[in-house]
Amino acid sequence: MNKIKNQMRPVFPFTAIVGQEEMKLALILNVIDPKIGGVMIMGDRGTGKSTTIRAIADLLPEIEVVSDDSFNSHVSDYDLMSDFVKAQIEDSINVATHLIKVPMVDLPLGATEDRLCGTIDIEKALNEGIKSFDPGLLAKANRGILYVDEVNLLDDHLVDILLDSAASGWNTVEREGISIRHPSRFVLVGSGNPEEGELRPQLLDRFGMHAEIRTVRDASLRVQIVEQRSNFDQDPYACIQEFDDKQNKLKESIIDAQHRLSNIIIDYDLKVKISQICGVLNVDGLRGDIVTNRAARAFAAYQGKDEVNVDDIKQVITLCLRHRLRKDPLDTIDSGTKVSQVVNDILV
């Protein structure tokens, strides 16, 4: 109990969240394989979007980072370490490391490009010939989660920068002929309320998954959610203690899935069927095919399997494709329903 009370601020347990299975699954799969490309969560106000996202970050195991490094550099993976750490390792210099909680970075709506990307001190560079870089939020988010609430209200050029960094895993800052780059691989999570406006289709397409959540209508479930929240507000540490076993079990499942992921195989015929579904739905580009393959492998790993089957694809494909369909104002059915219909026709 003392260990729990040492936390800076109690976080609502992920396993205590009632319902919203689609959102929870999308977040878990992105944590297992960050290369899925993040998740966009659209839903009504007060449906627990922010609570769930903060809860998944708190659930994750600690990561080992290089000490005295602003970019949470990995000690052995070249794709996740800064150029300075890379140079030290290549010169056979021993680097000290320590464990930290997975970074959870909030991007405020009023953030500037400099706050997001970081800034180069031009004066110091000109006067002293030293590259001086003040890291931004993309540096802090490396190997963690970057959360943008109301992403549909964020400036489009900032969304572009976010999506470029999330896709490439690197952030490059250039000012007056001086260029600095650093690793920036993170799980991008955006949330928003569709009543406040949609994202442009080309930006929406860059998110790996799209979860839609609705207000719970069942009276007994609503009471359960209210009681759960009231218990947490009254005594957060007792609530955390109550769900400690479930939290540890889920954490172990995620770690096991991360280790298992690289060995998961997906049959050629299933790959063809995924692409066939994308073709029938007129999905532009190949992101839908790539993300669905990744997500199906992550789901199979999460289920403790060695090979992807039809059920694994059915569980994730709507999340991966519903936001990639062309909008038709005359359509009477939801895009998720349209995906499900085609999936059930092809995956039998």
Image: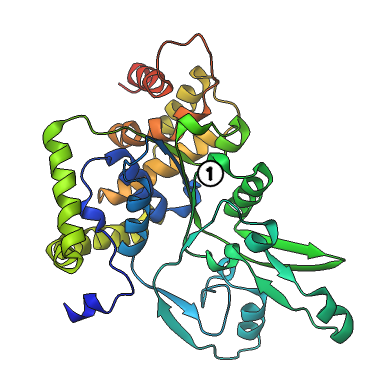
At x 32%, y 70%, the residue is 9
Quadrant position of residue 46: top left
Nearest the viewer among 265 and 245 is 245
Residue 38 position in % (x across, y down): 48, 47
Q: Is residue 120 left or right of residue 265?
A: right
Q: Is residue 339 left or right of residue 70?
A: left
At x 67%, y 81%, the residue is 87
Looking at the image, which residue sits at the far bottom?
Answer: 93
Q: How many marks?
A: 1
* Residue 58 visible, this angle: yes
Q: Is residue 20 above or below residue 310?
A: below
Nearest the viewer among 190 and 144 is 190
Amino acid type assigned to the residue bearing label 1 in the image: Val
The colour scheme applied to this rendered structure is rainbow
Q: Secondary structure at mark 1?
A: helix
Residue 4 position in % (x across, y down): 22, 75
Badge 1 crowding class, 10 Å Cα cut-off, few under 14, some 14 to 19, many 20 or more, is: many
* Residue 265 visible, this angle: no
Q: Which quadrant does the C terminus fall into?
A: top left
Q: Which quadrant does the N terminus fall into?
A: bottom left
Q: Is residue 338 above or below residue 7?
A: above
Q: Is residue 146 above or below residue 48?
A: below
Quadrant position of residue 126: bottom right
Q: Is residue 177 left or right of residue 341?
A: right
**Which residue in the protein does label 1 denote?**
151
Residue 318 position in % (x across, y down): 39, 30
At x 55%, y 91%, the residue is 94
Residue 164 position in % (x across, y down): 64, 50
